[in-house]
Amino acid sequence: MLPSSSKKLLPPYVSYRTFLNFLEGLQQTMPARIDRSYWGDRLSGSTGTQLVSALRFLDLIDVNGFPTVKLRQLVTSKGSQRTELLKQVTHESYSFFFLSQVDSQAATYAQLEEAFHDNYQIANDVARKCIKFFIGLASDGGMKLSPFVTKKTRNARPSAAVKKSGRSLDKKAGTEIPQHSGLIPNGTGMDKLLIDKFPEFDPSWPDEVKLKWFTAFDELLKRTGG
């Protein structure tokens, strides 16, 4: 039998910017259900799946993908009301941290990292992405977090080599490619064929298998120019 922690929904590790852009898109029209037919034209397979998993973890959609009251309130709210809703979502979703003995306003980055590892079976790279999303959500919720955590996250910047590579790709394509947008570029027919041939994601897989699927899919996107 798998450990109980392996059956938990993983904390969001999709780009927080992708999450915000998705919420903004819902302001136009809220679909009856959040499924692949809705987000498939906007996001890559791995990014879309990570986003849906994030919405589930935050209790913004139910197990069948239907929007919850909380999501509808969040999408229509503004100003202080939106901030308060984000604070509520953060407190409820990350209770494993806020209800621990660690002081959220004085914790070191290592303590926050340990809280994620103690409660979820995730690799270090995934934990880093989880923490980045958590800090973005908590900050937008007006929550005061430890400066030892926020400072380290702000200082985590892409290397010069990565930035240079990104600029070269933008220039070659003749258009700006948003970082971490998760969008699928207009590739060749072979690129699309390879992506279409990739195994369909199954939410019932163990978390270890899910992580391997995400890693393999991201590698496929890199090979095909995604």
Image (cartoon, rainbow, N blue to C red):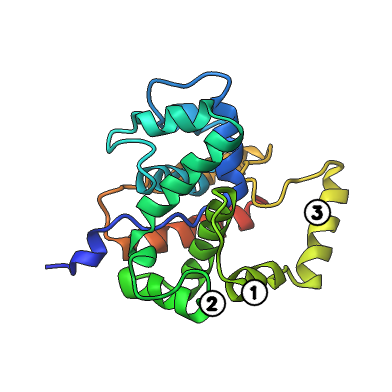
Residue ID at (56%, 31%): 41
Residue type, numbered disc 2: Tyr
Q: Earlier in the sequence, mark 2 or mark 1?
A: 2
User: Could you tell me which residue is drawn at 36 percent across and 36 percent down?
Assistant: 61
Image location (x, y in percent) of residue 173: 82, 45
Instruction: Identify residue type, mark 1.
Output: Lys
Q: Are marks 2 and 1 in contact (CB under 8 Å)?
A: yes
Reading the image, the residue beneath label 1 is: 152
- Mark 3: amino acid: Leu
The numbered dot on residue 109 is 2
Quadrant in the picture for the N terminus: bottom left
Percent of width and height locating residue 8: 27, 58
| The one of 122 and 189 positioned closer to us in this rendering | 122
Could you say which is closer to the camera, residue 71 or residue 82?
Answer: 82
Rendering coords of residue 91 (x, y %): 40, 53
Label 1 Cα neighbours within 10 Å, binned few <14 / some 14-19 / many ≥20:
few
Q: Is residue 67 left or right of residue 76?
A: left
Residue where numbered disc 3 is placed: 169
Residue 109 position, x and y percent, is 54, 77
